[in-house]
Image (tube, helix red, strand yellow):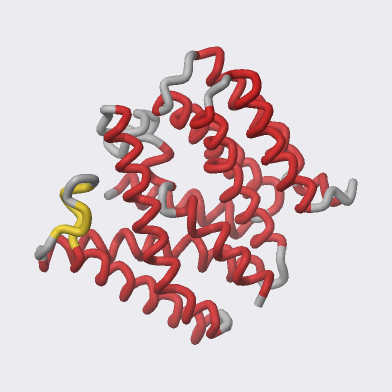
Amino acid sequence: MIASVAMIAVALVALVAGGVLFWLLAVVAALFMMAEWANLSGASPREKRIGQFALSVPLALMAPASLILEVHDFFTLGLLVGAAFFVVIVTNRRQLALGILYCGLPVLALVVLRRHEAGLVHALWALALVWATDIGAFFAGRSLGGPKLAPRISPAKTWSGLIGGILLATAFAFAMHVGEGLPFRLVLATPLLAILAQGGDLLESWIKRRAGVKDSGNVLPGHGGVLDRLDGVVPVAPIAALIVLLT
């Protein structure tokens, strides 16, 4: 629990600071994620490095300095797709190539959100709803128990946990609406995103089961890998960014 609080605190400091600090933290997280994804996909050390190097190019274009060069976010998105094609051509590993998008898209989404008008509120909402979903699911599932959500994939998850996570995430979003002016349309979108966060958790659990491992890595003692901590952010961040930018 102490480690989880510490990780959230570091993320909040970077989020409030924005700019280079937020981008650097996101880049470091993405490169760790890519390394863990490569291990889960059975890639060799050489192929892992290829994946990380390919991902580092679009990550570099997400830096605040790219705004001076007027690099458009759509160009960076295209470069992410291009990096994925490069990896599959060089390594012939489609799952490794998918890791470029899996690790890169949420970073691009969060960087774009943070840079947007009212970016601190929007990016905090996107991240904190995932944290609230995890916390609500943990305590509700432990207290209430009940039918399993997906016993073959993640035996500990329950339907009561899912509902508890949705309720806490939505309550947090409503509190942000009252206290920070979060648009009400984002409050209404929160239950769907909370479900996506749990879906991201289940997807990573399924991938780990296929790989025959308990954790994606050991970089966080007692908490597994970076993928284990950010699996809910992966699907939530891109959809949250689309909702903010298109509505």
Q: Residue furthest right?
A: 69
Image mark count: 0
The relative height of residue 76 versus residue 241 in the rendered view (above or below) is above
Residue shown at 52% from the left, 29% from the top: 96
The relative height of residue 238 versus residue 33 in the rendered view (above or below) is below
- Which corner quadrant of the image does residue 101 belong to? top right
Residue shown at 58% from the left, 63% from the top: 123
The relative height of residue 147 versus residue 208 in the rendered view (above or below) is below
Left/right of residue 59 with respect to residue 153 in the rendered view: right
- Which corner quadrant of the image does residue 172 belong to? bottom left
The relative height of residue 157 versus residue 226 in the rendered view (above or below) is below
Left/right of residue 233 with respect to residue 28 in the rendered view: left
Left/right of residue 18 with respect to residue 209 in the rendered view: right
Residue shown at 60% from the left, 71% from the top: 243
The quarter of the rendered structure image containing the C terminus is bottom right
Question: Residue 49 in the image: x percent, y percent?
Answer: 58, 19
Question: Residue 193 in the image: x percent, y percent?
Answer: 44, 67
Question: Residue 70 in the image: x percent, y percent?
Answer: 88, 51
Foreground residue, 198 or 181?
198
Residue shown at 30% from the left, 67% from the top: 165
Question: Residue 199 in the image: x percent, y percent?
Answer: 36, 56
Left/right of residue 170 with respect to residue 66 in the rendered view: left
